[in-house]
Amino acid sequence: MHESDLIRHYATIPVGTSFVRPVDVLHLLQNQPIAAKPRIFDVGCGQGQVAIAMAQAWPDAEIIAIDLSPEQIVKARQAAAQAGINTIQFGAADWREFELPRSGVDIIVATQVIQFMPDEHAFVEYLADALALDGQLLLRSVLLPEEEPGRSFVEQVVQQWIAHSIRFYSERNLTDLLRECGLSRLRIDKEEMWLDNLPAERQASLNRALQQHSLGIDDVQQWFWSGSISGVRR
């Protein structure tokens, strides 16, 4: 099963590995109105770096953080203890079987998670339904170009970079998805993924794709973006 493959893969991820910079997530969240004691849900929390940063930014927050990988949760708890944080409820859980408080959640963060979802609509609908009134959902992922040939090229490359990913989405795909799930006041923040200083394995897979399509880095740099899309439940 796909979930079993994910669990096995992420059990091997070294301590301290993070797939997003917590400071970037905090910056995006702090640009929006936030309750004094926010209720926060971090789904696919990995080793807890973002959850820990949120606990430090909002000491009175109620934070629940889950990940499919029990090994990642062990590392997250250890990292929180080392940071002196004991207010995060970490758990190894599948979101499809995880019930959130009926009172709703003020902030939901899902960073580099949606690409693993067999049914992205069910995933975002679950998150949107869990939001309190005026609650905010923040998704972060690679953003595909809207048009070909860039769309297919980027997806080919990033699926090799991110093990067991199923599919990726464009900015338009994700904004449409959030709207379909009842969210509004959408905000998009994105940044270019620079290709001139990649880890060796990623550089090798990129080079293979470039050779296959007879392209150079300067031809494809404009296609590589990552970003965050947020929406509010009204």
Image: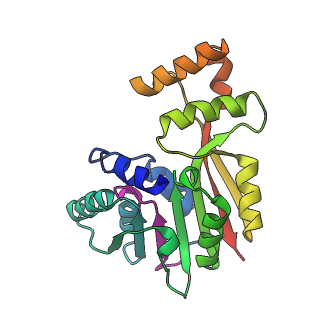
Percent position (x, y) of residue 220? 65, 23
Can you tell which quarter of the image residue 146 is in?
top right
Q: Residue at x 56, y 82 (%)?
A: 104
The quadrant where residue 53 appears: bottom left
Residue positioned 29% across, 57% down in the render: 71
Location of residue 9 in the rendering, given as x and y in whole percent from the top left corner = 37, 46
Q: In this view, does 47 lie above or below 105?
A: above
Which residue occupies the extreme bottom position in the image? 103
Across and down, in percent, residue 64 comes to 41, 73
Q: Which colour scheme is used?
A: rainbow
Horizontal and vertical percent position of residue 31: 59, 61
Do we see residue 32 in this rendering?
no
Q: Does the magenta stretch include residue 21?
A: no
Residue closer to the observer: 77 or 35: 77
Residue in the image at 49% along x and 69% along y: 95
Q: Could you say which is closer to the camera, residue 86 or residue 142? A: 142
Q: Residue at x 54, y 68 (%)?
A: 108
- Tell whether 204 sits left or right of 187: left
Q: In which quarter of the image is the C terminus?
A: bottom right
Relative to residue 24, is residue 56 depicted above or below? below
Between 207 and 137, the residue placed more toward the observer is 207
* Position of 14 relative to 117 (above/below): above
Residue 96 located left or right of residue 167: left
Residue 74 visible in image: yes
Measured along the vertical axis of the image, is residue 165 above or below residue 210?
below
Q: In which quarter of the image is residue 124?
A: bottom right
* Magenta range: 35-50
Does 46 sit left or right of 79 as displayed?
Answer: right
